[in-house]
Image: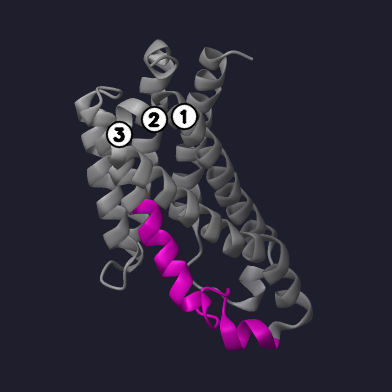
Amino acid sequence: MNIQAISRAGAAGMIISGLALGYSYVSHPHHMTPEMIGSAFWVVIHALFALSLVLGLLGTTALYAPTAERAGRWGLAGFISLFVGMMLIFGLDYYETLIAPYLAVHYPEVIHDHGAGDAMGPVAIFFPLAGVLTVLGYAALAYGWMKGDVLPKPVAFAMIIAALAFGFGLSPLGGLMAARVTAAAFGAALIAIGISAWRLRAGFASE
């Protein structure tokens, strides 16, 4: 594969990632009982979230690599930050997709005591930290892309605003509805970047 084909694949990955992220957050159940966590619906929602993380990270890498010089220091700092954040989030999502449902069926007392796992021990610290690293990373990368004329300014600015808003939505100040709305906005921003990269793939494939 050549760089243009990889960039186009990255753009497609960003579009699918944005769709999967928005749907999984908007549809995420509010009540995390053992019955819900052990259900097929719970597994599907978190499998979609895992898909959004994998394709989002692959897609972002494919688009960042050929534009790293133009994205500059902001782009580098943002990519490193979002990479670490998304890897940490994927670790919890792996648990929520493959382990928590098994515990909910066979050891429901664990779920009663700890919920889905996001407030379990050190996870209560590292999961919010992972979210902060991810949203700040995307905001910084979008700023680097905007400064380097990699992305159209409205698309880059939309990602910066959506990422910061999503960070607020995920915070204790945000609440469930804010998290859902801002997640949908963040997903839409990922889609917009993917569409722009698809249309402007020559710009993403050359320095």
Q: Residues within 10 Å of mark 2 (few under 14, many from 20)?
A: many
* Vertical relation: 172 (above or below) 152: below
Q: What is the count of numbered marks?
A: 3
User: SS class of the residue under badge 3?
Assistant: helix
Measure the C-alpha gap from mark 2 to mark 3: 6 Å
Q: Quadrant of the C terminus?
A: top left
Query: What's the residue type where badge 1 is placed?
Result: Ala
Measure the C-alpha gap from mark 2 to mark 1: 5 Å
Query: What's the residue type where badge 3 is placed?
Result: Gly
Residue occupying the far right of the picture? 106
120 in the magenta segment = yes
173 in the magenta segment = no
* Vertical relation: 177 (above or below) 109: above
Residue located beneath label 2 in the image:
68
In contact (CB < 8 Å): disc 2 and disc 3: no
Residue located beneath label 3 in the image:
72
Q: Does label 3 or label 1 sit earlier along the sequence?
A: 1
Tell whether 10 sits left or right of 111: left
* Residue at (55, 36) in percent of width and height: 58
Residue 165: horizontal and vertical position, in percent?
25, 53
Residue 114: horizontal and vertical position, in percent?
58, 83
* Vertical relation: 174 (above or below) 133: below
Q: Can residue 178 be spotted in the picture?
A: no
* Residue at (44, 76) in percent of width and height: 125
Q: Which residues are magenta?
A: 109-135
Q: Residues within 10 Å of mark 1 (few under 14, many from 20)?
A: some
Query: What's the residue type where badge 2 is placed?
Result: Ala
Q: Quadrant of the N terminus?
A: top right
Q: Nearer the viewer, residue 9 or 112?
A: 9
In contact (CB < 8 Å): disc 2 and disc 1: yes
Residue located beneath label 1 in the image:
65
